[in-house]
Image (cartoon, helix red, strand yellow):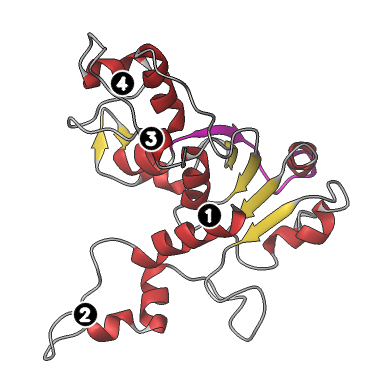
Amino acid sequence: MSSGQAFCFSLDKCSQSPTEQLKTFGVRIVSSSYVANFDVLRGLQAMCGQEVFASPLEGLKVIELGTMIAGPVGCTLLGDFGANIIKIELPKQGDALRHLGPFVDGESLFWNVDGRNKKSVAIDLHHPEGQDLVKQLVAQADAVVENFRPGTLGKWGLAFNDLIKINPKLVMVSVSGFGQNGPYASRAAYDRVAIAFGGLLNITGYPDRPPVRPGLPMADYLTALFSAFSRS
């Protein structure tokens, strides 16, 4: 059976409505919509008396050292397919995405969607104690994902060359605006910078006006998608 078929289940044998079933398995309903991952679907299959299929990436442990979208959403996608994602967040304030609206009941909708499938740990990477904690996690991990500006992790002793001494089998994915080397490598970048450099803004909008930025951070999400493929 293909992985696509693993998503399929029938509600014919179930007495509860789809929304009630999703709530049973811990899915928070926001504006009558929801995001379901493999764990939820497997639970629904079990409730309906159907054969339960293993998640494709079950047993894979990924340490996420990222913030916002381009790096972290790639981990979110891996989590959709069963990987165990451990997200490192800044103490007291957490990921910046937690503070991006719109909000429902004081929680960011962006965070509730893009931050799904993860177990968060607050660690300050600026301090040696925090760096040691990350190394302990990496020793038991299969992969690390980061989207700091190139060179930042090296200052903390957490660059790839440092981490493979702890875990020789480690796979590391680094996401940055202009790559890990080259004349612009040290520059910070956000989505609008990437789509401008890539030429997308040159073909959007109106001929007699400035470029029109797409309503969604397309470069960030596409980067996340392709980085998830590279890890798979």
Any mark on residue 22, and which? 4
Who comes first in sequence, dot 2 or dot 4? 4
Q: Tag 3, which secondary structure? A: helix
Look at label 4 and name its amino acid. Answer: Leu
Q: Which residue is mark 3?
A: 7
Q: Which residue is mark 1?
A: 228
Look at label 3 and name its amino acid. Answer: Phe
Disc 4 packing (10 Å; few <14; some 14–19; many ≥20): many
Q: Which residue is mark 2?
A: 204
Of tags 1 and 2, the one toward the viewer is 1
Who comes first in sequence, dot 3 or dot 1? 3
Disc 2 packing (10 Å; few <14; some 14–19; many ≥20): few
Query: What segment carries the magenta color?
Result: 116-130
Of tags 4 and 3, the one toward the viewer is 3
Disc 1 packing (10 Å; few <14; some 14–19; many ≥20): many
Q: CA distance from mark 2 to mark 4?
A: 39 Å
